[in-house]
Image (cartoon, rainbow, N blue to C red):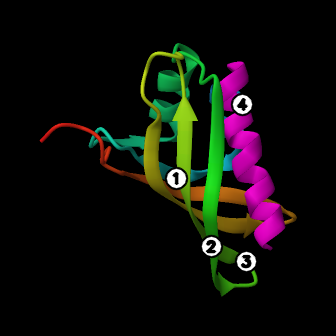
Amino acid sequence: MLSELLDLEHRGWSSLCDGTGADFYGRIMTESGVMVLAHGEVFDRGAVEDSLRDAPAWRSYEIADERLISLSDDQAILVYTGRAYRDEEEPAFVALMSSVYTRDGDEWRLALYQQTPVPDPHASR
């Protein structure tokens, strides 16, 4: 289960890097799925698709410290630290991320995605 869901996370991040995120998340999110984003907003599936259509692409990303919380054979939570880069001069976006998946037939669907920003330890206080 961990490898399946981690593969989906990588496919999602890859779509954010190549500009196809709106299509990817429009397909993978459940009908009532939401994303709770680092900037403090909650987007339903339609808002996610709309926001990703014109969003600047990420240059690269990393997933680390991944953990799986299995709720049942058909529901699980993937928790990890995500690090993503846009412009070379911008600092990395670093957040603790949680993705709640539910199986719909043979497919995993994203019901909830949540980001908690990790403060930059080098930022001035």
Q: How far apart are marks 1 and 4 (CA)?
A: 18 Å
Residue wearing tag 4: 15
Indicate the secondary structure of the residue bearing disc 2. Answer: strand
Q: How far apart are marks 4 and 2 (CA)?
A: 22 Å
Instruction: Give the dominant element type of the magenta stretch: helix, strand or loop.
Output: helix
Examine the structure image and report whether residue 75 is included in the region drawn in magenta. no
Q: Which amino acid does label 3 sit on?
A: Asp
Which comes before the other along the chain, label 1 or label 3? 1
| Label of residue 67 in the image | 2
State whether residue 24 appears in this view. no
Instruction: Count neighbours of disc 1 (C-alpha within 10 A) and say few if under 14, some if 14 to 19, many if 20 or more.
Output: many
Q: What residue type is labelled 4?
A: Ser
| Magenta residues (range) | 1-20
Say which of marks 2 and 1 sits in front. 2
- Give the residue at x 24% y 38%: 123
Residue wearing tag 1: 33
Instruction: Count neighbours of disc 3 (C-alpha within 10 A) and say few if under 14, some if 14 to 19, many if 20 or more.
Output: some
State whether residue 82 appears in this view. yes
Residue wearing tag 3: 74
Which comes before the other along the chain, label 1 or label 4? 4
